[in-house]
């Protein structure tokens, strides 16, 4: 995946197993502001009912790749 300047929002999932079969979900390697990297789900739907929206201090610096 090409690196792009994208505004990302981190949300907590109510049931992560639902994302495993969702056509809008992909796994991405994300670089955090502190230099560490984490594997996260990337959702292309943007309005999923499976989200618990709340503020988070862990903001991704850049998205490496989507699988």
Image (spheres, grey):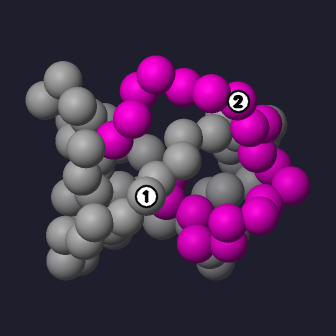
For the residue carrying disc 1, how many other residues have a C-alpha within 10 Å: few (<14), some (14-19), or many (20+)?
few
Q: Which residues are magenta?
A: 41-60
Q: Nearer the viewer, residue 25 or 2?
A: 2
**Res. 32 image quadrant:** top left
Of the two numbered discs 2 and 1 on the same chain, state the one appearing first in sequence: 1
Residue 11 lies, in percent from the top left, at: 63, 39
Residue 13 lies, in percent from the top left, at: 71, 39
Q: Nearer the viewer, residue 22 or 13?
A: 13
Left or right, 43 with respect to 26, comes to right
**Outermost residue to the right:** 49
Residue at coordinates 43% horizontally, 45% vertically from top-left? 40
Label 2 sits on residue? 54
Q: Secondary structure at mark 1?
A: loop
Residue at coordinates 43% horizontally, 58% vertically from top-left? 7
Residue 8 lies, in percent from the top left, at: 46, 53
Secondary structure mostly seen in magenta is loop
The verdict on residue 67 being magenta is no
Viewer can see residue 21: no
For the residue carrying disc 2, how many other residues have a C-alpha within 10 Å: few (<14), some (14-19), or many (20+)?
few
The verdict on residue 48 being magenta is yes
Label 1 sits on residue? 7
């Amino acid at each position: 995946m090409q690196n792009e300047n994208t505004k990302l929002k981190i949300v907590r999932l109510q049931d992560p197993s639902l994302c495993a079969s969702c056509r809008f979900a992909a796994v991405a390697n994300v670089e955090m502001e502190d230099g560490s990297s984490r594997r996260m789900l990337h959702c292309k739907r943007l309005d999923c009912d499976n989200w618990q929206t709340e503020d988070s201090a862990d903001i991704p610096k850049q998205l490496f790749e989507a699988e």
